[in-house]
Image (tube, grey):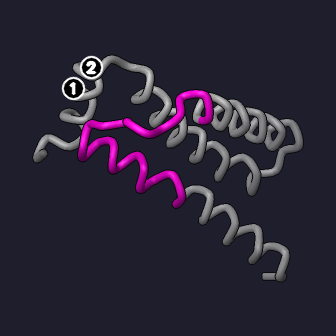
Amino acid sequence: MDWITIIGSIAAAASVASFAPQAWRIIRTRETEGLSARMYALTVLAFALWMTFGILKGEWPIIVPNALCLLLAGFIFAMLVMPKRMRAKVADALDPAA
């Protein structure tokens, strides 16, 4: 494996991992206070465009991490814009022990 692939792989893993703690916090606390819906809307758009770019170029190293980030950022955005009662239902379904 060459250095370019290693750097790209680490960058992809860091990008995906950066959204997981925020998504888990929302599930655990049912709170989205302090998060910007506009920022997450823009983030979702960016990941959707990067994923589309990867699909058009046929490059899996671009498609896969951006698809995963799109899912995580999309989840966070959805939780931000949905009513608190519905957010709690979604969180309960994902973490029934809470």
Q: Give the residue pinned by disc 2.
A: 86
Q: Give the residue pinned by disc 1.
A: 89
Q: Residue placed at 46% from the left, 36% from the top? A: 76
**Whole-percent x, y for residue 37 in the image:** 53, 29
What residue type is disc 2 on? Met
**Whole-percent x, y for residue 33 in the image:** 38, 36
Question: Which residue occupies the foreground of this view, 40 or 44?
Answer: 40
Please identify the quadrant where the N terminus is shown. bottom right
Q: Residues within 10 Å of mark 2 (few under 14, many from 20)?
A: few
Query: SS at mark 1?
Result: helix
Question: Which residue occupies the foreground of this view, 50 or 39?
Answer: 39
Q: CA distance from mark 2 to mark 1?
A: 5 Å
Residue at the farthest front position: 34
Q: Is residue 5 above or below residue 97?
A: below
Please identify the quadrant where the C terminus is shown. top left
Question: Which residue occupies the foreground of this view, 31 or 43?
Answer: 31
| Rendering quarter of residue 12 | bottom right
Q: Is residue 41 above or below residue 58?
A: above
Say whether residue 25 is left or right of residue 5.
left
**Whole-percent x, y for residue 73 in the image:** 54, 39
What residue type is disc 1 on? Lys
First to last magenta residue range: 17-39
Secondary structure mostly taken by the magenta-highlighted segment of the chain? helix
